[in-house]
Image: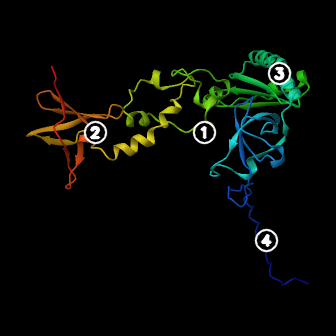
Amino acid sequence: MRDLTPNMKKRKKPRRQAKDISKKSTSRDMPNNLWKARVVSTNDFEFCSPPVDMGITRGDFVVMITRYGMDLACMRGPVSSLDSVETASIRRIIRIAAGKDFFKRSSLEKLEKEAFKKCHEKISKLKLAMKLVSSHCTLDERKILFFFTAEKRIDFRELAKLLTAHFKKRIELRHVGARDETKMVGGAAVCGRLYCCHSITDQLASVSIKMAKDQNLPLNLLKATGPCNRLLCCLSYELENYAGEKKQLPRRDTRIAHEGVIYEVAEINMLSRTIQLSASGGRLMYVNLSDIVQNPEGGWEIRNDRLNTAENK
């Protein structure tokens, strides 16, 4: 007998949407005792919540579980802002570092040098287009990490296989950028101080040539770039102050009348606190920033006659 029941399609159950497990920082989720620590080997910053009974102070060294494994870290101080902190990024402190931990860290340097040399040999043998930056063995000796830079994506599976067979340990190869390389290796900058990324900050903010223009800095790329061939991080440090000051000053090419002569703003020097005005005939006039005021009509004028005038020969 023929089945006259209509062919009904089974309704598919709607899929449950995956929950967002990346928790943003809120005062309710964050622990009360949140600190920032700098990892000795990789120079990365980690967030941690040391137990109060440990009695940890600024500058203490601890053994903690970092993003790469067990390692030594130096406590830098409590975290004042939770804007960039996520609950998943808070690391666990095992103990305050003792003499045996420093001895172990020192003894691992020989293994790391051997690992670097062996990895470099394998890279040359396999003809891989990559530059080895550093090697690091975790404090528990379970893992050896190799950090490298490369312009293109590298298939390093054969390299990892050879290194695993040689060292009998877990091997990880990490592709890092040019700025990360400078941050890890360190060195002295043109100012005579240690690289900012290596010593005082973990924020590798984007830097543009416009930042140099806004601060009237000479556009010499040889002087404005660091060893990573990227613009200097310090170009962004005072940008906000310059931007705030410029809002209260006339723009370049603004016309200012004084004693029957029309001048134009040629240059503003924020360091010397002066403005260079130019007029027809090559006449130049230097005015202190404090002597330039905005009138009720929105124009600009010179407040007094304490001026430094120079004829352009």
Q: CA distance from mark 1 to mark 3?
A: 28 Å
Task: Identify residue for label 2.
Answer: 289
Residue type marked 1: Gln
Disc 4: CA contacts within 10 A as few (<14), some (14-19) or many (>=20): few
Q: CA distance from mark 1 to mark 4?
A: 45 Å
Give the numbered dot on residue 176: none
Question: Relative to residue 44, is residue 127 depicted above or below?
Answer: above
Residue type marked 2: Leu
Front-most of 284 and 59? 59
Q: Earlier in the sequence, mark 3 or mark 4?
A: 4
Task: Identify residue for label 1.
Answer: 203
Residue type marked 4: Lys
**Residue name at image x 82 percent, y 16 percent:** 114
Q: Earlier in the sequence, mark 4 or mark 2?
A: 4
Q: Earlier in the sequence, mark 1 or mark 2?
A: 1
Q: CA distance from mark 4 to mark 2?
A: 70 Å
Q: CA distance from mark 3 to mark 4?
A: 59 Å
Instruction: Place residue 172 in its image quadrant.
Output: top right
Is residue 149 shown left or right of residue 301? right
Secondary structure of the residue carrying numbered label 1: loop
Task: Identify residue for label 4.
Answer: 13
**Residue 133 place in picture, x, y as percent:** 70, 23
Secondary structure of the residue carrying numbered label 3: helix
Task: Identify residue for label 3.
Answer: 106
Q: Nearer the viewer, mark 4 or mark 2?
A: 2
Q: CA distance from mark 2 to mark 3?
A: 56 Å
Q: Are marks 4 and 2 in contact (CB under 8 Å)?
A: no
